[in-house]
Image (cartoon, rainbow, N blue to C red):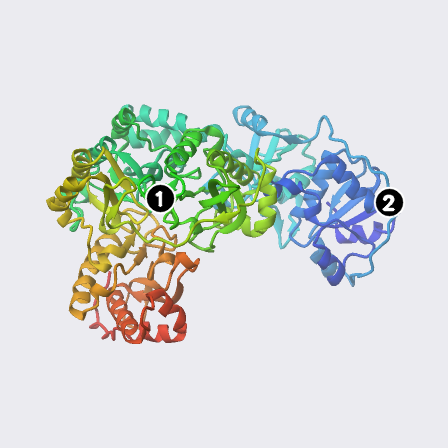
Amino acid sequence: MVSPVWLEAHRDADSVVVVDVRETRDYEELGHVPDAVTVPADRFRDPSSVADGKLPAADDFAALLSAVGIDREDTIVAYGDDGGPLAARFLLTATVYGHEGDCYLLDGGLEAWLEEGDRSLSTDAPDPEPTAYEARLQDDAPIVDREDVDAAVEGDAVVVDTRTAAEYEQSRVPGAVHLDWEDLLEDGRLRDEGVLEDLLAENGLTPDERIVLYCNTARRLSHTFVTLRHLGYGDVSFYEGSLTDWVRAEAPEWDPLELQAQVRYYADNGGFEAMVDELGEDVLGRLKLIGLYHQKQRGYFMLRTRAPGGVLTAEQTRTVGEVADEFARAPEAYGGPDQNPVFGDGYLDVTTRQDVQMHWIEIEDIAEIWDRYDAVGLSTMQACGNSVRNVVGCPAAGLDPDETVDIRPVVERVSQRFLGDHHYANLPRKFKVSVTGCHEDCARSGIQDLGLTPARKDGRDGFVARVGGGLSDGPRVASDIDLFVEPDRVEDLVAAMADLFMDHGSYLDTAVNRLRFLVAEFGPEAFREELATYADFEFVEPDETLTMDYRGDHVGVHEQGDGRSYVGLNVPTGRLAGEEFADLARLAADLGDDEFRLTPNQNVLVPHLDDDALEDLLADPLLERYSPDPGPFTRGIVTCTGREFCNYGIIETKNRAIRWARELDDWAEEAGIADDHEAIRIHMSGCSASCAQPQLGDFGLRGEVYRDDYESGRAADFGLGGDLGNDEFIDWLVGKIPIDDVPGVVKATMRAYDADSEPGESFTEWTRRTSNAALREIVTDEPARDPPAIGTEVS
């Protein structure tokens, strides 16, 4: 570590090379320390693994230093404008590769250079004579890997987390102490040595200790490394992969089979509190990998069950229903049988990914539930978490008389390929796949990380791939990468994409590390090229794609290819009692071929019905509640779990949506518009996470909180006009509409559509033709709200 005064006095020496690690544009346009050479930070990191922060190859680093005229014996002084980590990273890299001269960091960087004395910057670029630098990884290089860190944790070394306190609390190497790299600074400069020594000693860091540093990607730790070396600490090393490597897929704590074994153990040995006490609170995040999602009520879980492609046997359906009826029951402390005024108790939810989930599950019951599931071939493995999720498929696969490919074998192969595979158990983020063999894209390829729809090549039927779709923050319609995939190559393509994702995706920046951000960063063409390097089959283009339309749902009676029928039943919000789910299994067994289907619209489907069976099904009393011919609002309502159980939910969704749908259907009948609309799609998410896919609805809602001059309370952002058939998401028009005002706003919008639309014009077409300003005026004019009485409390 050197001061600006030292640099001023020594920078003209022949053996001193000053290195500027800022971006080239800043170096050239804003100026630099006179005679400093430019080595931008992105040049001394492994370009194939930027997210992991790996060192460059020795030959690449040598070429970089040769080009700017650095010899192995030169004294290097590096600086930047970020407080020092990137310049320190350059010096750390030089140390690892055996630089023989002194390596100094300019204390305070460029800002300190300008603040002290009357110094200016230069825009003149030096023209150094190239050298023949040799970079060699030293046998005693201060670099360690995961195994070394494991040994250090178990041994007598001090493992130091140099990130922020918030990051440390969220996730860390077990046993690590915390020392934020910026705590070593005061006003951007290194603290006095006496203060530093006291601070380090307080955290167990003394010169006689072996110290191992880590951060996220070995950048911030570099400053601490240089500082400790400057203070005379001799045994300091760093974890190159840092926490990014620690949490990667094959970390032992992310083994799904081991997690299942742990849960089974604690089911019989102390339950939830014993598990958390012994394994730590962070185990709750890992349990998502085996289908257990800790709900907001401490000690209770949502259990999610996979149904690949939405296909279940009648026996599996009955088992799920019985499990929900028996175990998904609220304790008395949370209301018992009366905990939900609309749905009661013992219910389950069908999800938009064709899973089934239920609440109020306790650790003590999990082993028995899994045993029942194992007996009928069900699994909760990787139904949640950052893994290859349940594969969404056309609910009418094998039934549709016009389909090109029966996707059921494809979906089953993909599901079995990744189920329980430790290598793919912890990807940077969740990986969502859909496969459609019909011509209507009912599995919604446009919002998947990988969506496959039918295509043809040289007379062979297969799929065309779309990549990088998704909702939530930063929604993106998937890109067609013009790639034909044979049905027996789909699992290989999924594996190739997962491998690419692990290599290039960030394991730590969860806000922007979904695969769609990676596709956007590469660009579709470059992503296809990179993906080809991971696949073990030749990439070819399709001759033709076969998707002709987008299908919203499968509600109603439909003819199968074999002349029989299947019936889609509407399950408003996807929620029904476990006992009713078991009753539907009975109908599927008695009237069909022991098969049952779940749809991406949170509905269910009973297939393989001959004429007599169809008549019997339509006459069953259960269909009075789950109708094949519901009202338009009831048919179109889709919701997430909401505030009732979700830690992120702002508004309650399920109960509210049922009330709204009934109210709006009654209003539509009275207004004379019910027969004009097969379905009016309201998608309501309890927060901004888009689990209910609000961007796809005619009406999209996401939970918020509002405050005005009179009151505060629950609210919703409001949007109109989603149409996945045309690759269009809704336009968000108005933020924070008080939640109780939403039905009135929906009615006002439908009245305006009825009055203004042209003959044959769909709701989405009307919203696209009408300006957002005009739509916003409709939305904000209705309803007129009277201010509440003074002192009114709003929840």
Q: Nearer the viewer, residue 117 or 356?
A: 356
Q: In the figure, residue 362 lies in which quadrant?
A: top left
Q: Is residue 497 visible?
A: yes
Q: Say if 55 sits above or below 700 in the image.
A: above
Whether residues under marks 1 and 2 lie with C-beta atoms below 8 angstroms apart, the answer is no
Residue 581 to residue 474: above or below: above
* Crowding near the residue tagged with mark 1, few <14, some 14–19, many ≥20 C-alpha atoms within 10 Å: many
Q: Is residue 139 left or right of residue 404?
A: right
Where in the figure is residue 794, as x and y percent of width and height? Answer: 23, 63
Q: Residue at x 72, y 58 (%)?
A: 25
> Could you tell which of marks 1 and 2 lies nearer the N-terminus?
2
Q: Which residue position holds label 2?
A: 130
The residue under label 2 is which amino acid type? Pro
Position in image of residue 439 (x %, y %): 39, 49
Does the image show residue 522?
no
**Occupied quadrant, residue 585:** top left
Q: Residue at x 15, y 43 (%)?
A: 617
Question: Horizontal placement of 769 versus 298: left or right?
Answer: right
- Residue 31: x, y in percent? 76, 61
The residues bearing labels 1 and 2 have C-alpha atoms spaced at a distance of: 62 Å
The residue labelled by disc 1 is 394
In the rendered structure, the answer to whether residue 494 lies left or right of residue 401 reads: right
* Rendered location of residue 68, percent (x, y): 82, 47
Which callout, 1 or 2, points to the residue nearer the camera?
1
The quarter of the displayed image where residue 228 is located: top right
Quadrant the C terminus occupies? bottom left
Identify the element where label 1 is drawn: loop
How dense is the environment of label 2, judged by Cα within 10 Å: few (below 14), some, or many (20 and up)? some
Instruction: Name above or below for residue 260 compared with residue 102.
Output: above
Instruction: Identify the amino acid type marked 1.
Output: Cys
Which quadrant of the figure contains the N terminus? Answer: top right
Instruction: Name the secondary structure under disc 2.
Output: loop
